[in-house]
Each structure stands twice: as C-alpha cells, then as structure tokens.
Image: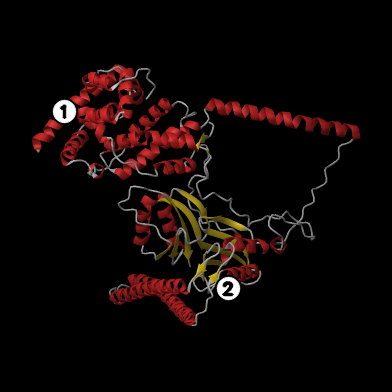
Amino acid sequence: MGSSTLSYSCADINKLLKRFQDDLLLDEESQAFLKHLAVCSKCKTFVRAIGSVSNQIWELGEIKVPEDLAATVIFKLQHSPRPSALKASPSDVTLRKILAGVAVIILILPVLFFSIGHMLKRGEVREAPAAPVMTVSRTAIEDQTPGEVKAVESDPVFAAVDDEAPPAEEPDEVPEEGVVDVNFSPAEPEPFEESLPGDVASKSLHWHVQLLDGAVDRSWEEIMARIDREIAQKSSRIEQLQSDISRLQKEGQAELGRYYSSDVEKKESQVRQQRDQVINLKSSEAEKLTADIRHLREERSRSETAQRQGTSEKQRLDGSQRTQMLNALNTLGIRRDWEGAGFIVFGTDGIKTQQALEQVLQIYKGPDSFRDFTEDVHALPGEPCRVSLFINDGEEARLHWHIDLMGSVEQSAVIEAIAPLAAAVNYQSGDSAVFTIMESKLEELRGKVRAMRVPLYEYGSRRSSSGILVSRPVSVSVYFMK
Amino acid sequence: MTAHSETSIKYLITLYQQGIFALVMYLIGGEKNTAYNVTVAAFVKAFQSSPSLDNEDAFLIKLAAAAVEMSRDVKVPPADDNADFINLPPEKRRSLNIAKTALGALPFEARVYLLLRDQMHLPYAAIASITGKPDKASRIQTTEARGQLREKLEEVLRRG
C-alpha cells in the first residue's frame, strides 16, 4: 500500500529482519521491505522460514481464492439495488423540488402569454371543443402489426385501453465488456404478483424446442445414439411415475376407514380427490411418454434400415433455427411479451397460435426437437392465448422447471419459497416465471419445493452446489402446469 | 456517481481479493462459502461507495472496513478446511494448523488487528481508519493481540 522511495537489497533485508519481525520498522521502511520480498523469492522464503508468530499469520493468508469471484462481484453490482449512501440528502431534495418548480413555471409562462395574447386579439374567449376520441375494437388491434394501432371508424365513445401491453423487457445476461454502470439498478426483486394480462390467461400453452443452430451433420450412428438416450431417459421417467402412482395408491388404501367422524371423513374425501388428480396427471404423462417411446423406436428402426441400405443422407439443418423461428413470429405479427434465459412468452389469438405452431413445426424437425406440453389445450379462433416457449440450445443446458399443481394455493406457496432465495425476478406472469438465483442456493430451493410434495420436473442440468466453492448466478425458467 | 469501467473493477478485485478473502475467512472462523459471500458483498459495498477508483489506497481502506464490519455480524460455526495447505510438508502444515487454531480462539477485535497488520501488512494509519481507533491505539492493540496469540499458541501446544 502506498509507494515508498526507499529501495532495499538482499543485504538490507538481512539487517532489517529482526526489526521487521518485531514490527519496529517505520511505515515507509516496512513498505520497502515488503516490496523487496514481492520481487525476491529467495528473501521471501528466508523471511518466512523464520518461525515468528507474525510470519505464521502471514502464511495463513496464502489460500486459494475462488476463480470467478470477480464475475460474481460484477454481477452483483449490476443487479443490486441503489445503496442508501447514494440517496439524495433532504437538502438536495428540497433544492431539486424548487428547481423543478421554477423550470415548470418558465415553460408554462410563454404558453400562458401566447394564449392570453391570442384571446385578446380575437376579442373573445371560446370554449374549446371536446376532443374527439375513437374507440378501437379488440379485433382491430389484433389485426394490426405490432406497435401500430389504427383507429377503426365507429361511433366515437371512449379512448381504447390496451390491456395487453407487455411488461417491460429486462436484461437477463451480464453485459459485454465495457462500462459497468454501478448506478444501474433494475427493478428490485419484486414480490411475485399473480396479475394476469387481461384475458390472455384463459388459454395457456407451453412448448419446448430443441435448438440446433447452424449446419449440423449427423451420421446415422449419432442419430441412433440420440434416440437411444431419449428412450432411456423417458423409460426412466416412466418408472419413476409408476413408482409414484403405486405409492400414492397404497397411501390411499391405508387411509381408507381410518376416520370415523363425519367432519374428518369430509376432509379425507377431499384429500382422496386431490390424490386421484395427481395419480391421473402422472398416469397421463406416463401414457404420453410411452407413445413417445413407440415413435422413437419406429424412427430408430427407419434409421437402421437406411443405414443398412447405405443411404448416405445426413440430417442437415442449415441456417439459424432461432432466427427462423423469430422471423416466423414477426411475420405473423406476434409481439413477444418477454424473451430471455431461453424462454419466450407471447400472447395472441387462437388462429395465430395455430399458425405459429405450424411454422415452428416446419422449422424443428424430428420427434425430439419439439414438444407440446399442452396438447389438450385447443386454441380456438378469436380466443386469446398465451404461449410460453422454452428453448434448449444444447450448448448450455438451460434450467427449466415444470411444476405440476393442483391449485393456486400451491402455486402461491411455491412462489413464496422462490422469492426470498432468488437474486432477481426477471419475469413473472400467471403461469410462468424466470428468476435468477445463485448456484449455492439452488439446492436449497429444490429441497424446499420438493418438500412441499409438489411434483417438480427439471429440464436442463446444473451440477449440485454441495461442496463447491464457486457460486454462479443461474437463470431458472418455471412453468406451472395446470 | 460516474460509472466505473469494468477493467478498473476487475483490476482492483484481482489486486485485493486474496487479502480480503483471507481476512474474512479467518475473521468468521474458516467457513469458505460464507467467506465468499461476505467478500463479494464487501467488494460491492466498496465499489458502490467509491466515487472514483483512482486512489487504490482509499479504496482498500473502504474495502477492508466493509469486510471487517460484515464479518462481525456473521454467525457461522467454525469450519476446519485444510485444503489450502495440503501440498505443504507435514511439519509446516502442522504448525500452520496450530496457528490457525490459536488465531480462531482469539477475540474478534484481536483477530482484526493481527490480520490487518501481520497478514495484509497495512500501515497503522490505514488500520486506524478501518477500526476507527487512533493510530497509537492501533499499535498498542496489535501488540497486545500478538501477545494473546502467543499465549494461545502455547496453550494449544500444551494440549497437544
């Protein structure tokens, strides 16, 4: 610390050693002493070899620092709220108010003088006509391109209110190299709110796409290996579901007849109904997975045949799939409510939802490249829909959770568990959310959610945080399945 | 407050992270994950309260002060992690572990003075700014802390 004009040689170090150990050197001498040790490893080793108490404290400092401490600090600087030290003092606030008031008066005065002058010139004061307003029907809005709303001729009654205005986009990544605005304070982690954008929540769809950007050459071996992995994964999941179903059924059987009072019997009946709902959900997921495995086996069989026949065809996916998909949405006039952390949310009507689905299916080929988790939801024409789209880009398996729920009470409980542990809430809507959480807290959150006995299915992967020193921020997208 | 350049921030972190991390670790009792979080928080606080990063010494004082203050409030059970000294000769490792045990047994304030002076080698004027005590008092406290450490070392060695 500081800069010393003194400069020591090895011989000086030898002479000053005793005084250094007894802490009797002046500050400047001490700095010069340490400066020599920093550049002379021989002297440093020699000084440290002397068994003094101070030396031991010094050597204890030679510990390994986590490698990405700098990255975490920068991330925190960009996402922490404005510190109280930067808030304006009361006298500053008063001064600002005065200056603001003066500015307003200065701006208003010319307008006032002009108006008075104009009225005096005309010799009379007329009543301003009522401002004509137009009504814009919802259908008219949906037919417009994003950002452009034209009035449709109809009886002027009242001004239209766009209740489908999207929430403001929030950045989900640390900015590139450059200026780090320490003043930058995006919205503080807000409590989750269950506010729904108008009627959009009446139909909610959720899709997963597997992104394969760029040209990809895949041999038949690679394709079959991929299919085998997929089959193994789904089979394992089916086993898990069947085990859950079996456990739930046994629990149900054990509880029957336990209660004798009619009040408690009512409660038991409710619990049984809920359990049956969960069993049904798991059963239907197991059925879907079984159907998927059947399709995968068929595809594998076709690949094997093609390979035997010596077909040299390889799957080639040219161009950027992500770009194609986003262009398709733009062409359809679909405005994205939020985009980030591998998650896109957009709201539109039933017709455009179907069109969007057709476009996406044309881009993403293969049974495992696209999955619709809301197959039973039918997007009817004219009916508002919202689509949550999870994009897995493969290079980094983004973390995405599906949480099966039985009702809004459970959803609120999950939200309450997430909010205090999350570093920031990036996006939130009725049935989906994206938040950022430090890796060291991820396991804790998983445990809390699982302890609620709420089915949680995880896509993507993140290593367990136990035993690691490094804690990175992780973006997690959540979709509450209903 | 003007925005700091990412380069300046990274430079200061690289310069001081070792010293501050070690300081925090021995102040809170050796639990590395908590030490990591406190170190990060101390850096954030120091950057946010520094109008300029031109004066490195002034920044270090703010940083060390934040680290000490935040460590004071931490309540974690002490951890025994010897991973950092694993490559040292056994005898050396033993003596450092003894020193670590003795240091951990000292009161918090004594550890502050010892670590700031004997580990980070800060001048007494800087230590005075960090602790809020006058220069002379800082010297006396540091000398007393060394004496306490020697007693603790003897105690640990006697226990075996």
On residue B150, the disc is: 1
The percent coordinates of residue B124 (x first, y second) are 31, 21
x 61%, y 55%: residue = A166
Pointer 2: what residue?
Answer: A378
Mark 2: secondary structure: loop
Q: Are marks 2 and 1 on the same chain?
A: no
x 73%, y 28%: residue = A106
Quadrant holding the N terminus of chain A: top left
The percent coordinates of residue B132 (x first, y second) are 34, 23
The amino acid beneath tag 2 is His
Q: Is residue A352 left or right of residue A72?
A: right
The amino acid beneath tag 1 is Arg
The percent coordinates of residue A399 (x first, y second) are 44, 59
The count of marks equals 2
> Which of the two marks, 2 or 1, is nearer to us in this view?
1
Q: Chain of mark 1?
A: B
Q: Is residue A84 above or below residue A304?
A: above
The percent coordinates of residue A326 (x first, y second) are 61, 61
Q: Is residue A414 left or right of residue A125?
A: left
Report whether residue A42 is seen: yes
Q: Is residue B45 above or below residue A407?
A: above
Measured in 3D between alpha carbons, the distance from the residue under mark 2 to the one under mark 1, in whole angstroms, is 78 Å
x 80%, y 60%: residue = A153
x 13%, y 35%: residue = B156
On residue A229, the disc is: none
